Image (cartoon, grey):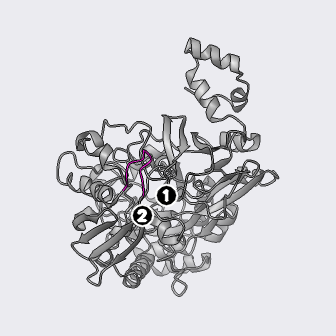
Amino acid sequence: MSKPPLTESFSLGRRTVLKAMLLGSTAPLIMRSRALASSCDDHVVRIGGIFAPDTMNPFATWSSFQSTIYAYDFLVGVDAQRHPDRKGFAKEWSVADDNITWTFKIWPNMKWSDGQPASARDAAFTYNYLLSSMGKPDELNVGWNSTGGLENIATISAVDDETLQIVTKAPTRWPIDNWIMMIPEHIWKNISHADARSTFRNDPPLVGTGPMIVQEFQQGQFVRYSPNPYFRTGKPAIGGMIFNFFQTADPIAQGLKSGSLDFGISLTTAQWDDLSKDPDIVPDQSRTEQRNYLAFNTVSGKGEGSTKALQDPAFRDAIGYAIDQKVIVDRAFRGHAEPGVGIIMPAATDYYSDLNNIRRHFDLAEANRRLDAAGYRDTNSDGIREDKEGNSFQLELITGTLSGLLEIPIAAVQLIVGWLGEIGIPTSVSQLDSGALNARTAAPAKDGGGWDLLVAAAWLSPSAQDVLVLGKSADRQNRSYWKNEKFDALLSEVNVTANLKKSRDLVDQAARLIYAEAPYIMLCYPSMLEAYRKDCFDGWGKDISMWSYSPFDRLRPV
């Protein structure tokens, strides 16, 4: 059912609702109107975002993260390592001198949202539930709670109710960098792996240790939450939450203006600028782990592009001098991004480097000089360069926004095409939807490839493994198809390193290597544009998280 206009939501009176309940004819409209009701009186925080969760089961989908993060905890995760007041299931953690034995202290006397004790035994159950599925037909590898990374685990056990021990086969930071949501053993112990990865929907109310309880889920419409009375820092002061799902940002901006929404994310730059003029609305932006890039099709053979120049690091390096990241940020993103440098995004604070001593600068003359020196000249003076086989360049650039990622403005693509034209490389553009883009950029063995250039994005965690995965051979995230044995060796060493200082050094070496080889030119690191109303709730803070439930655990009614 399509979403009704916001004005329709406000006009439903008590008699209309009663009549609809009796007739049973407009239940979806009633649910949507309730989710968008405009009132501070009930102390319910109303959120709007562009998301489409299909189930509340974290083992069966990748799409439910933004909905379930308020109900479930990670053992540690991103925010707990950045903010001392945002710990997850574990209160503290340490690794022994052997770098393979990790000890986690679980919050004492913590309870699940149904009042049952929440202990280290539940955390051990969560991980061992996944481990026991590995290598079997029903392996739990199709959702957010996945077996990925568990291959390096030797044992996971509860020493006592407040102590979890993880022993790895080799040193790794996976025990604190994994994003597996902790689940209660008493709810999940009788759910088979086959059901967990498919038919089990985990219907509300969800039992977790987060500040909110999922009480209702209407697919394509909203999730409704109530405050968790057993939350470890105390029952949240708000009356609950409703997360409304939309397909575009327009109704989010409208809802913020009208007061039917208290908080909105996934806004466009134009909407954000417009909302900043409203005295009742505070616009905000958050750093994200998204990386917008220009990728080259580097594969040789099946799936290769229209010219072998794409396989030449010298050609790719020269193109790098023809891309002005600052102009892309200023014009295409209106300043709501940071200029691209290497594959490590600034949000990955443990690993980011500005590569100052090797970074390229925008210089079309230098791009032309390097193309000439590499053998890609305009021999017939027609304004178009030729490759080493004597063929005039005519590249195809494909682009689109992959599902769940922030939109890449077409203006960014137009700027790139303009600069390439100025250095004698004409380029056509094919704009694709998410499904078609995924198909075109699949591995050549899966019938992907055949394109030349790609403007797309990736959004993964700030862990060492995830920041480097764009260059990992044969990985789905490596849409350039680039392969480099030295890079893969560095990544393999990162995967068995627990020491942060050593991990930083390895990541920096890998980042410099892939920058020099240039299978990607990083365009920018976009911000998440959001806004909140200040007339109903206090406590929003300056750092609204994309990796946890903060600040919704600490909001207060005005």
Q: Amino acid at mark 1?
A: Arg
Image quarter of residue 75: bottom left
Horizontal side, residue 10 vs residue 152: left or right: right
User: Looking at the image, which is closer to me, 181 or 144?
Assistant: 181
Provide residue 457's location: percent of width, then percent of height.
Answer: 49, 59
Q: How many C-alpha atoms fall within 10 Å of the one at disc 2: few (<14), some, or many (≥20)?
A: many
The label number, if any, that marks residue 107 in the structure image: 2
On-image quarter of the N terminus: top right
Q: Which residues lie in the magenta part?
A: 110-118
Q: In this rendered view, identify the residue nearer to me: 184 or 454.
A: 184
Tell me if label 1 and label 2 are in contact, CB under 8 Å. Answer: yes
Q: Amino acid at mark 2?
A: Trp
User: Residue 469's spot in the image, x, y percent?
Assistant: 38, 66
Whether residue 277 appears in this view of the structure is: yes
The residue that appears at 37% across and 37% down in the rendered structure is 201
State left or right for residue 67 relative to residue 270: left
Residue 186's spot in the image, x, y percent? Answer: 30, 46
Q: What kind of element bears circle 2?
A: loop
What residue did someone put label 1 on?
232
Q: Residue 191 is drawn in which quadrant?
A: top left
Queried whether the magenta region covers residue 113, the answer comes back as yes
Q: Residue 461: x and y, percent?
A: 44, 64
